[in-house]
């Protein structure tokens, strides 16, 4: 085998990861039609907030789930809720600590089809400095050659991510379970 | 006094057991809520503050439920006569009705606050109250302002009412205070 051949082979190997995604459609999130909200429980009653700024790399094709890959990055400093004191508290060191950990990241590790228009994504979620496996269940609301819309949810344990340090690790006043709902609308790049 | 239906209801001269019971339950509840309210708002944000707000909310809703019972009972019953000079009588009755205004307006404005804040109330874990208005920071501060001043109004009315009751007992030496005692 001469060196030209070897270079060609190495070149193809280097391109492989790109090629793996190349035939998978890449999607661009439409921020105005997408949302991520959380619902926690304080004193036995729900409280909801919205992450208003997130971005992501989405390679998704229902026909090629094994090659699909999604990474979503949430700007933890951009929280909106009606009660300003709440978002200020959530940004503080005991909660999200947005100064040290400005981003939360979801990265998929695999997709499975669970129904006609329903899917399950396995992946990891990183909040603060903790990474945990999570499962997202989502439903395809819209899927065409140009546009897709998925809605889904998952429930996480906030203390597993260190959200709520010190006295806040008490899960009576603020429950451990936090539900996350999302809507992602995207156009094909 | 026999504990029968007749002793539960008011007579032309005396308050019945039901009215007396409701009076004192409400008195204790309102005093507790006012003290708790004044204390909790000064606390720094923390677990303690959150817990106390939770209590203030659910006991406040309990007060709203009880005042509905009390108001209904009052309307369904005769009010014992008040044999004092006409101006004093007007003053006394005005204070009594003012209490009803506060007893209704305070929990309702509190409920408006938690609604506007998007922090709904769980009633002792039994059910979650629906939001009266959608969450909105601007109306939130307005409701907070109104709730606070209603609270001060309640405190002022409480002192007037208590001072008058004590005056009747210790200075006039009549049965005005005694007839509200169990």
Image: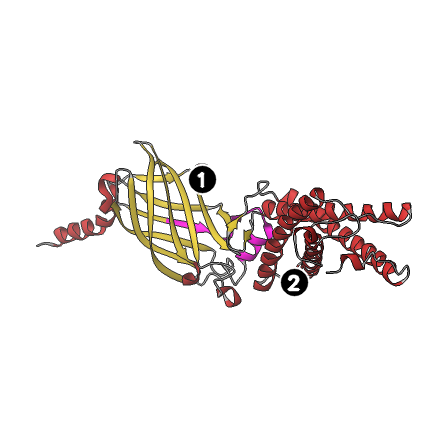
Q: Position of residue B21 (x, y in %)?
A: 68, 56
**In the rendered image, which quarter is residue A124 located in?**
bottom left
Circle 1 residue: A31
The answer to whether residue A38 is left or right of residue B9 is: left
Quarter of the image where the C terminus of chain A is located? top left
Residue A88 is inside the magenta segment: yes
Q: Nearer the viewer, residue B113 or A152?
A: B113
Magenta-colored span: A72-91
Q: Position of residue A79 (x, y in %)?
A: 52, 49
Circle 2 residue: B43
**In the rendered image, which quarter is residue B35 located in?**
bottom right
Residue B42 is inside the magenta segment: no
Query: In the image, what residue occupies the spot 48% across and 53% down?
Result: A40
Count of marks, rendered view: 2
Quarter of the image where the N terminus of chain A is located? bottom left
Q: How is the image coloured?
A: secondary structure
Chain at numbered mark 2? B
The answer to whether residue B116 is left or right of residue B19 is: left
Which numbered circle lies on residue B119?
none
Outermost left residue: A1
Q: Nearer the viewer, residue A66 or B172?
A: B172
Query: In the image, what residue occupies the spot 55% across and 52% down?
Result: B123
């Amino acid at each position: 085998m001469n060196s030209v051949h070897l270079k060609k082979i190495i070149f193809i190997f280097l391109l492989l990861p790109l090629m793996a995604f190349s035939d998978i459609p890449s999607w661009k999130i439409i921020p105005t039609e997408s949302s991520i909200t959380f619902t926690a429980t304080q004193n036995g009653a729900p409280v909801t907030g919205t992450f208003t700024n997130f971005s992501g790399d989405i390679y998704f094709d229902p026909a090629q789930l094994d090659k699909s890959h999604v990474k979503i990055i949430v700007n933890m400093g951009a929280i909106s809720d009606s009660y300003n004191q709440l978002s200020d508290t959530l940004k503080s060191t005991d909660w999200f600590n947005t100064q040290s950990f400005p981003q939360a990241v979801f990265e998929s590790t695999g997709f499975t089809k669970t129904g006609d228009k329903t899917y399950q994504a396995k992946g990891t979620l990183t909040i603060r400095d903790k990474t945990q496996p999570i499962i997202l269940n989502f439903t395809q609301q819209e899927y065409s050659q140009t546009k897709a819309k998925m809605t889904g949810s998952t429930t996480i344990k906030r203390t597993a991510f260190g959200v709520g340090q010190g006295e806040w690790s008490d899960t009576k006043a603020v429950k451990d379970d936090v539900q996350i709902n999302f809507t992602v609308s995207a156009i094909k790049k | 006094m026999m504990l029968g239906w007749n002793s539960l209801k008011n007579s032309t001269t005396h308050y019945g057991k039901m009215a007396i019971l409701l009076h004192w339950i409400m008195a204790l509840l309102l005093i507790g809520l006012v003290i708790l309210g004044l204390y909790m708002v000064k606390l720094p944000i923390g677990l303690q503050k959150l817990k106390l707000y939770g209590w203030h909310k659910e006991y406040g809703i309990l007060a709203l439920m009880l005042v509905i019972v009390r108001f209904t009972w009052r309307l369904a019953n005769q009010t014992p006569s008040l044999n004092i000079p006409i101006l004093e009588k007007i003053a006394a009755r005005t204070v009594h009705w003012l209490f009803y205004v506060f007893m209704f307006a305070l929990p309702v404005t509190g409920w408006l606050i938690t609604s506007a804040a998007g922090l709904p109330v769980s009633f002792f874990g039994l059910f979650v109250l629906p939001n009266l208005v959608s969450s909105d920071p601007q109306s939130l501060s307005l409701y907070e302002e109104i709730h606070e001043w209603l609270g001060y109004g309640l405190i002022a009315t409480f002192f007037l009412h208590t001072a008058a009751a004590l005056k009747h007992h210790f200075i006039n030496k009549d049965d005005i205070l005694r007839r509200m005692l169990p």
